[in-house]
Amino acid sequence: MQFGDLIDLKAILFIALIFIPLERLLPHHHGQQTLRRHWLNDAVYPFLNGILIKLGLLALVGTLMIGIGVIVPESVGVAVRGQPIWLQAIQVIVLADAGFYLAHRAFHAVPFLWRFHAVHHSIEEMDWLAAHRVHPVDQILTKSASYLPAFALGFSPAAIAIYVAIYQWQSLLIHSNTRINYGPLKWIFASPRFHHWHHANERHAYDKNFAGQLPFLDALGGTLYLPDRMQGRYGTDDPVPTVCHDQLAYPFMSHTARYDGHPPTAIGDSPK
């Protein structure tokens, strides 16, 4: 085991010590077990995806920044970095989540992209560990859409680091099996219930709640769905395998079921 793997293992154990008790104290689905189905498969993803996503982001964002650096004047970055860090952080969160929203929506609308995103939507029991079941191609493209505006406009590394930290914890929280509610702030900050509806295998929930942190983006985009009831079931009817290495190969398999982009006529006819 390498040094980087040890750091990842310590981070996962630390996160588990926070979210496992939280999910037992405030469960959204009371009957769900801590060691639910396919938990071991999802536990592999943080270690497998770590280096792949970092290298992919570095290559893609770095390449795009070469062209953007020619277009965006340096004076823009100077003006942006002249603002207080707290204000920069708020601006980065809004810009990054807007990029996330658009990329996430594209992964649902474009059949080729959906084949990668379907791996994440194959989750049938939501918890903090389920947040890690993502195809690296999905994460590289989505995170690039989030980070690129902040880098292009020259925000300070501290402001971007604040966003990254909030995003990472928020991603775990909104997938967790918890019933945490924000009251009237639920329209501003994404709650677990908000994101659970995005994963719901119910016709009315298809293609809803794309934002990662800011639900008002869905309100603006006409994709907000937050009824006062619990979800019936999660997952997708696409034939996604249940084993990690098969899930990574799934988008490239010739027999992969493809979403034709048409509105569903019955539950399960299309992805969420």
Image (cartoon, rainbow, N blue to C red):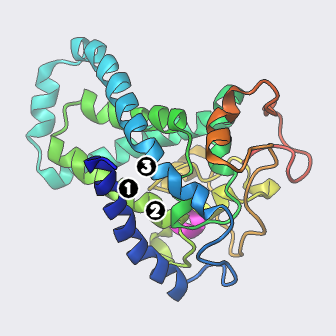
- Rendering coords of residue 24 (x, y %): 54, 85
Answer left or right for 13 relative to 124: left
Q: Return the residue at label 3.
A: 47
Q: Please tell me whether mark 3 sits on a helix, a strand or a loop.
A: helix
For the residues bearing labels 1 and 3, Cβ distance under 8 angstroms: no
Q: Which residue is drawn at 16% across and 47% down?
A: 158
Where residue 269 sits, quadrant-wise, is top right
Q: Which amino acid does label 3 sit on?
A: Phe
- Visible residue check, residue 90: no
State which region is magenta: 190-194
- Rendering coords of residue 261 (x, y %): 78, 32
- Rendering coords of residue 71 (x, y %): 26, 13
Q: Return the residue at label 1.
A: 168
Q: Please tell me whether mark 2 sits on a helix, a strand or a loop.
A: helix
> Is residue 155 found inside the magenta-colored segment of the image?
no
Where residue 15 sits, quadrant-wise, is bottom left
Residue 13, numbered circle: none
Answer left or right for 56 relative to 164: right
Q: What residue type is labelled 2?
A: Leu
Q: Which residue is drawn at 30% across and 56% down?
A: 6
For the residues bearing labels 2 and 1, Cβ distance under 8 angstroms: yes
Residue 167, above or below 152: below
- Visible residue check, residue 270: yes
Q: Return the residue at label 2.
A: 172
Residue 135, above or below 120: above
**Disc with the residue nearer the chain's start (3 vs 2):** 3
Majority secondary structure of magenta residues: helix
Answer left or right for 74 relative to 173: left
Q: Which amino acid does label 1 sit on?
A: Gln
